[in-house]
Image (spheres, helix red, strand yellow):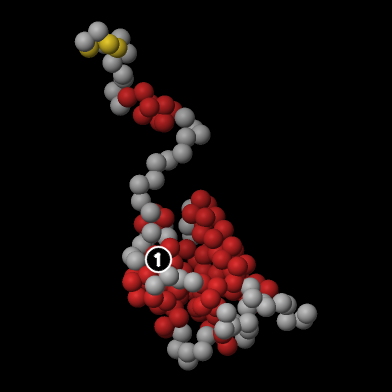
Amino acid sequence: MSNIAGGQPTAPQGGPRRQLMQNDPFSQPAYTDSFYAAVGGHETFVKLIDVFYDGVATDPLLRPMYPEEDLGPAKRRFLMFLEQYWGGPTTYGEERGHPRLRMRHMPFRVTPEAKDRWLFHMRTAVDSLELSPLHEGTLWDYMERAALTMINSPSASA
């Protein structure tokens, strides 16, 4: 703009950075919310957990890894963990301390086949959320990496 204020040119309304961001198709959006809030918060994570455990409940390889007859406590722990991890309430840490995921899974024989079954049910759950491609990719990448790190036994056929 050609306005002069105190001898200095003034920036257009909104400032030069704002105009650049509005006109630049390659700029990244500014995220102010956590991933947790951006994907819908508590309701989204409840749905993820419900759909996931619906699959686990009938899976002959995974179900025996959950010693409790009722999957409710496992669902609650996993919900609290994921909510805290993705920027939601910190209830998991307040109630259970550090996650120590590998240590907590050591009593169970987690084979590559078990990982694949876990990911099968988690894929169904993630797909049920109908997230944006960016959020879906972020969530799925985490799930794949987490599942891989839980393997603590060789293949059942080995």
Q: Quadrant of residue 72?
A: bottom left
Q: Is residue 85 above or below residue 31?
A: below
| Image mark count | 1
Q: Residue furthest bottom?
A: 69
Q: Residue at x 48, y 54 (%)?
A: 135
Q: Secondary structure at mark 1?
A: helix
Furthest toward the left, the residue is 6
Does residue 58 appear in the picture of this structure? no
Q: Report the front residue among 39 and 87.
A: 87
Of 7 and 39, the residue lying toward us: 7
Q: Residue at x 48, y 57 (%)?
A: 131
Q: Nearer the viewer, residue 133 or 33?
A: 33
* Relative to 33, residue 68 above or below: below
The residue that disc 1 covers is: 83
Residue 58: x and y, percent? 57, 84
The amino acid beneath tag 1 is: Glu
Instruction: Give coordinates of residue 54: x percent, y percent.
Output: 51, 79
Residue at 51% across / 59% down in the picture? 139
Residue 117 % position (x, y):
63, 75
* Mark 1 neighbour class, 10 Å CA radius: few under 14, some 14 to 19, many 20 or more: many
- Quarter of the figure that contains the C terminus: bottom right
**Spot occupied by residue 116 in the image (x, y as percentages of width and height):** 65, 72
Looking at the image, residue 53 sits to the left or right of residue 90; the answer is right
111 to 27, vertically: above or below: below
